[in-house]
Image (cartoon, helix red, strand yellow):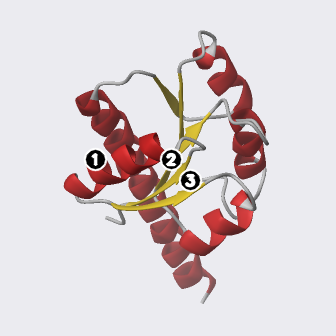
């Protein structure tokens, strides 16, 4: 299973902490600050995205909508992270797959992240299996 995780976060210290946690969990993390996020998502092709909701230049909900509305990236699980009291409502409204409130428990972060990466991997395998079957039946 691909374990590449894109971290979109404006807090450098938190990004570094997430980077260490993810590396220790066997992931390949990459950090960006939110600018040109769509091209970064496409180029890195992560198996999941950890996305801060409250950022100064562009809100995480806007970024999430952009990711979920693009055919090339919509299947990638997005987990929003924030201390905002309405995080669950915001995450659901923009199409995020999950959310984690700050301060967060490392085990809860890993559980949520790995659950969605496993789900995405299963979906990808099912789709590729269906494509193989449809190609065989067309031949």
Circles 3 and 2 in contact, beta carbons < 8 Å? no
Instruction: Tell me which residue sits at (51%, 58%) in the image.
Output: 31
Q: Quadrant of the C terminus?
A: bottom right
- Mark 2 neighbour density, 10 Å: few (under 14) some (14–19) many (20 or more): few
Instruction: Tell me which residue sits at (29%, 35%) in the image.
Output: 111
- Check disc 2 and report the residue beneath it: 12
Residue 112 % position (x, y):
36, 34
Instruction: Point out the frontmost of discs 1 and 3.
Output: 1
Instruction: Point out the frontmost of discs 2 and 1.
Output: 2
Left or right: where does residue 18 sit relative to residue 111? right
Q: Give the CA distance from mark 3 to mark 2.
A: 23 Å
Name the image quarter holding residue 109.
Answer: top left
Residue 6 % position (x, y):
50, 56
In the image shown, does 129 or 70 lie closer to the viewer? 70
Left or right: where does residue 43 sit relative to residue 99? right
Dot 2: element: helix
Q: How many marks?
A: 3
Q: Give the CA distance from mark 1 to mark 3.
A: 20 Å
Name the image quarter holding residue 2.
Answer: bottom left
- Check disc 3 and report the residue beneath it: 76
Asked if 88 appears above or below 51 in the picture, the reply is above
Asked if 31 appears above or below 87 in the picture, the reply is below
- Mark 1 neighbour density, 10 Å: few (under 14) some (14–19) many (20 or more): some
Instruction: State the mark number for residue 120.
Output: none
Circles 2 and 1 in contact, beta carbons < 8 Å? no
Instruction: State the mark number for residue 21.
Output: 1
Circles 1 and 3 in contact, beta carbons < 8 Å? no
Instruction: Point out the frontmost of discs 3 and 2.
Output: 2
């Amino acid at each position: 299973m691909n374990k590449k995780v894109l971290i979109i976060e404006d807090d450098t210290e938190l990004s570094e902490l997430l980077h260490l946690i993810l590396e220790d969990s066997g992931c390949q993390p990459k950090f960006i600050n939110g600018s040109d996020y769509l091209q970064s998502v496409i180029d890195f092709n992560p198996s999941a995205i950890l996305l801060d909701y409250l950022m100064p230049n562009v809100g995480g909900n806007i970024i999430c909508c952009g990711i979920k509305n693009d055919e090339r990236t919509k299947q990638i699980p997005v987990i929003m992270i924030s201390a905002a009291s309405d995080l669950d409502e915001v995450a659901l409204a923009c199409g995020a797959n999950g959310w984690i409130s700050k301060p967060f428990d490392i085990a809860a972060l890993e559980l949520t992240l790995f659950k969605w990466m496993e789900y995405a991997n299963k979906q990808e395998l099912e789709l590729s299996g269906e494509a193989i079957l449809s190609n065989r039946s067309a031949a």
